[in-house]
Image (tube, helix red, strand yellow):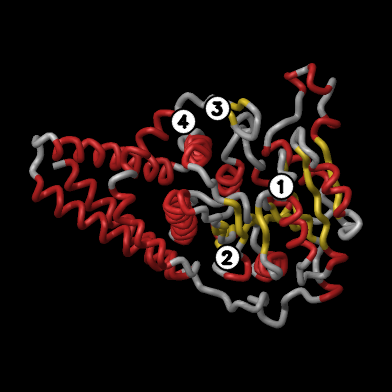
Amino acid sequence: MPFLLLTCIYSILLIWLAVKWSSIPTSNQNGDILNSSSPKNNDSPLVTIIIPARNEAGNLPKLLSSLENQTYQKSKIEIIIVDDHSNDNSTEIITEFKKKLPNLALIRLSELSKNSERDKDNLITGKKSAINVGVTQAKGDWILLTDADCKVADNWVSVMINCMVSEELNMVTGPVKGEEKKPFLRMACQEIIHLEFLGFVGMGAGGLKGGIPLMCNGANIGFRKSAFYQCGGFGNKQNLASGDDEFLLRNMHKMDPGKVKFIKDKTAIVTTVLSDSFLGFLKQRIRWASKAFSGKTPLSLLFIIFISVFYCLTGWQWFMVLSGMAELKLFLILFLVKLFAEFVFLYPILDWFDKRKLILWLIPVQFIYPFYIIVVGLASRFRFYRWKDRWVT
């Protein structure tokens, strides 16, 4: 039976990812994960933090305040915000923060675009373009990326840079968790979103530990500027609206697998804003899924195809059981096997993030996820959707 075989393979994959996640060394939580050779004070390298932003006036103060509190030497931090054609008051907010952060610079893509909005062929736009411009302008060889709707821990720069420098890495990815806003009627939606979100973090970290660059989150990435150019940056995927993080991860990993690492340190956690509506969440997942089959390594592509087929078949099995055309007993046994494997995979991740209660949503998710995967997968194939007040493909 295909469903029996796929369920067994799926369960083995999740348990393998759980083992890999647990095998990642957890550094101490004081911001110094290195030995005595860690860069200190005047020996600290210059770091450039690049923040692509579009219409993030409501979130920028929170991020910039967290960057103001970094324990890393202030004179060795350069902050570049690359504004992607915002039409809100982001510029005014950034200008005000320059009084507190003299090392803060603003680059506006609208000013770099030839002939402005009239010439669409020469318009410089999109997150990848923003990052490319930021890297070009960066003074430091050590680059950190985060998103404008995030906030970072006080030791974030120290932990990320110390790890890259001491271990001579080309790229690091870090942990990201959600910041939940909990109006009563939306709490369930956000809890389910957060459960999936942290599952993705663990899947990316476990896969990388196992030698397969599955995914990472662009809200918490560090790399060497020289390595960025050496690996080709985002390659030929500049035209896609999403996927900057994963394309860079795979190019870096392809160039030198031993120099790409996930940092499992709680003081390096970046907190991002979760969608507070199911529609907003769905739009984001469609955007993510739109690049699911682009630029994959053979193993990661096989993984994505397998997961897609498995959940489609799971949805079909639900239909078959409810219509009386499939045996209920066997389906329930396989359902419990799948549930057990997902628990084994998710609980250590949730435990590390201190989000153990989210595991309670695992059972309700069983009845939603197969159909959600099908809807998102089909919608993403159109590659034409609205994101941040702009139609993208």
Image quadrant where residue 308 sits: top left
First-in-chain label (2 vs 3): 2
Q: Quadrant location of the N terminus?
A: top left
Tag 1's secondary structure?
A: loop
Residue under numbered circle 4: 380
CB within 8 Å, label 1 to label 3: no
Observer-side mark, 4 or 3, equals: 3
First-in-chain label (1 vs 3): 1
- Mark yes or no: residue 211 visible: no
Residue 14 drawn above or below residue 248: below
Residue type, numbered disc 4: Ser
Query: Residues under labels 2 and 1: Cα distance?
Result: 29 Å
First-in-chain label (2 vs 4): 2
Residue under numbered circle 2: 263
Q: Quadrant location of the C terminus?
A: top right
Residue type, numbered disc 1: Gly
Name the residue: 64% across, 35% down.
388
- Left or right: 378, with 8 as reference point: right
Residue under numbered circle 1: 58
First-in-chain label (4 vs 3): 4
Query: Residues under labels 1 and 4: Cα distance?
Result: 28 Å
Name the residue: 77% across, 33% down.
87
Residue 30 drawn above or below residue 108: below
Query: Residues under labels 2 and 3: Cα distance?
Result: 33 Å
Residue under numbered circle 3: 385
Residue 41: x and y in percent read 83, 75
